[in-house]
Image: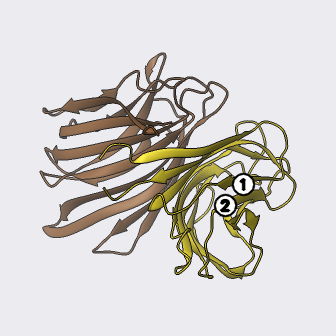
Amino acid sequence: MSESLKFIKKSSTTSATSSLEVTDCFSSSYDVYKVIFEINSMTAEGVIAVRLIDGSGVDSTANYDYAIKHIKDTTSSSESRVTGNTSWNNIWYGEGSVGGFVVMYVHNPYNSSSHTFMNFKNTGHYLASSTSTMYGGFGIGVHRVAEEITGIAAIQTSSRLENANILVYGVE
Amino acid sequence: MAGSLIKIQETTVSSATANVDLTGIDDTYDVYMVKLYNVVPSTDGASLYCRVLESGTANTAAKYDWADVYMRTNSSFANEAQENNTQWNWQPTLGSASNESGQGIVYLFNFSNASEYSMFTKEMTYIRADSSSLTGGQGGGVFTDATNCNGVSIFMSSGNIASGTFVLYGLKITS
């Protein structure tokens, strides 16, 4: 029997950028995708957001809802509940060369009759006033536009995303 | 390691169906995974339920425990849990209006091991019926009977499954 997790595409950066994009990775071939964000280093402490790519490019309009449970080893957990945002924000947070990871499932991105949903988990590390802090969490999101989504992008508005990979797989 | 995620059964509901039974779980794989998407209930606000199958028959005993973090955009998150229920609740109060549907990933453990309880972890995301708000749950559950289960039966708390796709995979984690 054949493997049902199909590697599709990878995008990488080795220099500081504000947007790492994987274009033309979603198609009619699959309904559900597994996306792995591998963040190897940040030039400074910062947050990673995620935006989707449609026929007009990276969608930065207020089409994103998300809910996230944030977990730290130094403080109690917290939550984010946001509607009508310009990205799925706070998908990851960290700094320096410790890096971290996000594993995200994206549902129905290329279905023009459906909104695009996602769920994810993350893990990372940063120094909060010199206190070593493990930061992780999990969450959900929806992009409230019924359209063909063709790609996905990691956004760091201050261009602190220095070394990272995004890998996209189809779940057949 | 080649061939780690192997599709076993795929069922797409295009006309109202009482339940979707995914079978084929045995000792071939260590862990099984269920992918579900575009799930819509016939009755707005019905919840997506699940029971284990024993030799293809759903077990209705009050042996289903589960707990999760219930996330939503319109109010604070909640920690939810139930013991000795007659099913697991995978997606409470699922919406059926336009662009309202359920999606999720579930991992199944120990199902074919008659010496262990069957367990699952879940990651769900959907639109809740009463508020049209983004909703989801991350958590897990256990069927508190050490028995051989060969699948899962997925159904709605009331009414039918109007549409949706349900896929069972085997996950080989040993060489």
Q: Residue B86: percent from the left, percent from the top?
A: 75, 75
Please, what is the three-letter code of the amino acid marked with disc 1?
Answer: Asp
Residue closer to the observer: A120 or A19: A120
- Looking at this rendering, what residue extends furthest in the top direction? A56
Please name the residue shown 24% across and 53% down the image.
A100
Chain coloured yellow in this rendering: B
Q: Residue B48: percent from the left, percent from the top?
A: 72, 58
Label 2 belongs to which residue?
B152
Residue closer to the observer: B120 or B90: B120
Circle 1 residues within 10 Å: few <14, some 14–19, many ≥20: many
Q: Secondary structure at mark 1?
A: strand
Q: Residue A159: percent from the left, percent from the top?
A: 21, 35
Chain coloured brown in this rendering: A
| Residue B162 in view here | yes
Q: Secondary structure at mark 2?
A: strand
Say whether marks 2 and 1 touch (CB < 8 Å): yes
Residue A77 is drawn in which quadrant? bottom left
Q: Residue A54: percent from the left, percent from the top?
A: 48, 22
Label 1 belongs to which residue?
B21
Which numbered disc covers residue B149? none
Q: Earlier in the sequence, mark 2 or mark 1?
A: 1
Circle 2 residues within 10 Å: few <14, some 14–19, many ≥20: many
